[in-house]
Amino acid sequence: MRSVYTCLTQAHDHALILLAAGVCIVGVYGSFSVATHAARSEGRAAAVWACASIIASGCTAWATHMIGLLAFRPGMPAGFDPYLTALSLLVAIAGIGISVALAIGQRSRVYRFLIGLLLGASVAALHYLGEASYVVAGTVAWDPQLLALSIPTSLLVFGTAMVVTGERRRDLRRAGAPLLIAAIAILHFCGMAAMTLTFDPARLLPSGAVPPELMAPVVASVSLGLLALGLVGLRLTLNFRAQVRRDQERLRELASLAVEGLAVCDGTVITTANRSLERLSGLDAGALNGRDLLGLFPGLDVTALPEREEREAELIGADGQRVPVRVLRSDVRLGGKPQTVLAIRDQRERLQTESRMRLLAFSDALTGLPNRAHFQDLVALHAASYREHGRAFAILMLDLDRFKLVNDTLGHGLGDTLLRKTAQRLKAALGVHDIVARLGGDEFAILQVDVAGPEATDALATRIIELMGRPFLIDGMLVNVGASVGAAFAPMDGIDPDQLLRNADLALYKAKADGKGTFRRFEPALDARMQARRGLEADLRRAIVVQEFELYYQPLVDARTGRINAAEALVRWRHPDRGLVSPAEFIPLAEETGLIGPLGQWVLRTACAQAAQWPVHIRVAVNLSPAQFRDVRLADTVKAALAASGLSANRLELEITEGVLLADEERTLATLTKLRAAGVGISMDDFGTGYSSLSYLRSFPFDKIKIDQSFVRQLPSDPESAAIVRAIITMGTCLGMSITVEGVETAEQFAFTTGEGCDQVQGYHVSRPLPLGEFLSFVDAREAA
């Protein structure tokens, strides 16, 4: 290494060394730039630029080497063999050309490394042919160790340079040129240091040797050419970068517009169209280019379109189909010329989506019928039509009579199927122009148009009731529901849409109240009744606040001893103006309005407080409604009433009907379990009136069964009633439950039920319901007897 350093610092002209380095850097940069431009070009231009890059690369290596030789100071006369000098240049160009040709398109690193070795070998041949062309007046000796070190090292660097120039990463590719410069420097200066010159006066320069003074202009010319090439490469690079920036800007503008189709226009003539527009129009690029926009978008004035503001239009496709689109216009400069760019967005999917949304907004998802909002709009439309044209119409409201029972017992899936089948039957019953809608749940409405008179509405309602009275076959089961219908006729019953709907609803309410499965037309008296009902509801709310209620008690006696051992608490409402209001009138209203909750709590607290003052062997029975069981705090409410009154839990009986269990069987059974665990007795009231009672007896062990009075009325003369009562008594006894028979009104009924083994008897034969004072007096008299 010292010999190399000594050769570089003492045996060379440093200015020329720097010049050689500069020529090498400029030449390598220019060669790479021209090669990159060749890769971006196509056809003949690519071949021309590739040849220029190869020649420039060879000239760079040769000029660097020759300037290095000119910088060498051997201390004796020296010159250049013109033939070997020319051969070294040709070898450099040929070797580099072959290497570049082999490297094109190669991705294998091993293959590129081998090509680098070939390139290094050609440059080494250039160097040593150049040194062989350098003749002096003396002898030449070589250092084999330095040659053995420098040549393989330079070849390794050449191979590495070729590998990194083919990498995808830009930072690695940028290392290619410095590595090539380093390889050339290693090869030259190590080769020069390996050469030892000894002056010999006896040796003269060959007659054809070219002196350094004459070789310098040749090398200078080549160097100037390389400098010019470097400037060309710089210009090409700058132009390319500027072009890339311009193209990227254009692409960004086009991409921001290319929502669907894209057309570049010169005025109103399409010059370029993208593939999306070709697919949208059904025309290929050849058919679109040169086409006038009016032929594609009839009625569209492109010049009047505001920039970057969408407008609705229609595109006429190749098959003549009209495609709804939205068009967006923008003016850009392409190739130095202003152009109009149109972005075309296909609107078919959006319009279909909006149509589906409108359908969902105005249709019932389950049946596909118009929903409440749509039906109200239709009624308003026909009301307006009546005012203009005098076309009478009718509104019919329809409820399924036993839908809730079917839905709760057979499942919501079957209930949904029933509603769909109901919709189909209703559509089959209607006229061509009549409309049926589902308002929600099992409530349907019908708009009967162009009605000749009320008789036509009566006939339609009769047909609907008859159709809905037929059994439905669902999943192999026959399901019977029936329907109630109420109707209002326009203009007889009003013309305002809201009024008509309200009057039809009042008629439906009347039909259901009259026994269901019936039809009622609106009557003015119905409105009066509804007003009275609203007044009663207001009075009921006030009565709960001011506590206008009182409890009556109906005694229950032991069937064997005749002794009173329980009493059922029955609520009564003492209205300040109307006197006593029948429970049959206000209890259903309380359940419907949700007032049964606070009313039931009052009954429970009051019954517990009053029963705590009775003889300890008399229990109190309190009825609980299904609405009360929807309160998850029911068990806590009962415990609180017992605690506040001081009544023992075993003296309280809670009577429930099958409707309580139907509401939510799992939650209800959990609540009943908590109550029974607290010591409260549980009784099933009105047993035998529902078809699911036996399954509930198996699911939950009640303390008591109360046989419904409907089975007692015909006793003992009716054999079927007698058989049913005997069966229930026998079943309850086997299940370990006590049996109470309610509704016993005659001595014969009392004798029959006690004779069959029932445990308790309740009814007018024992006593009617009594106010608290009379009940206590009755107990005292009974005990005294």
Image (cartoon, rainbow, N blue to C red):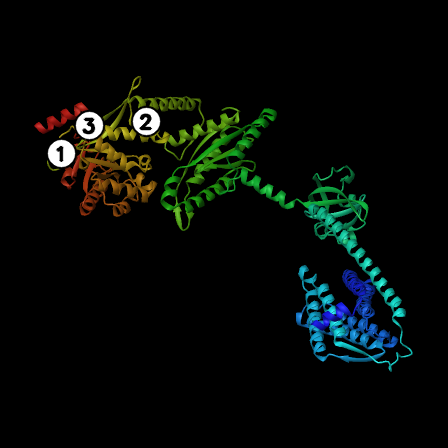
Question: In the rendered image, which quarter contains the C terminus?
Answer: top left
Question: In the rendered image, which quarter contains the N terminus?
Answer: bottom right
- 639 to 524, vertically: above or below: below
Query: Separation of disc 1 and disc 3 at Cα?
Result: 14 Å
Task: Please tell me in which quadrant of the rendered image residue 201 appears.
Answer: bottom right
* Residue 172 drawn at (x, y percent): 67, 62
> Is label 2 in contact with label 1 (beta carbons under 8 Å)?
no
Q: Tell me the kind of residue under disc 3.
A: Gln
* Residue drawn at x 30%, y 17% as measured from the top left: 576
For label 1, the residue is 617
* Residue drawn at x 79%, y 74% as measured from the top left: 126
For label 3, the residue is 610
Q: Is residue 529 left or right of residue 283?
A: left
* Residue drawn at x 72%, y 77% as measured from the top left: 147
Query: Separation of disc 3 and disc 2 at Cα?
Result: 23 Å
Which is nearer the N-term, disc 1 or disc 3? 3
Which is nearer the N-term, disc 2 or disc 1? 2
Q: Disc 3 vs disc 2: which is toward the camera? A: 3
Which is nearer the N-term, disc 3 or disc 2? 2
Q: Residues within 10 Å of mark 2 (few under 14, many from 20)?
A: some
Outermost residue on the right side: it is: 207
Q: Disc 2 vs disc 1: which is toward the camera? A: 1
Q: Tell me the kind of residue under disc 1.
A: His
* Residue 769 drawn at (x, y percent): 21, 27
Element type at marker 2?
Answer: helix
Q: Residues within 10 Å of mark 3 (few under 14, many from 20)?
A: some
For label 2, the residue is 586
- 781 to 727, vertically: above or below: above
Q: Can you see residue 245?
A: yes
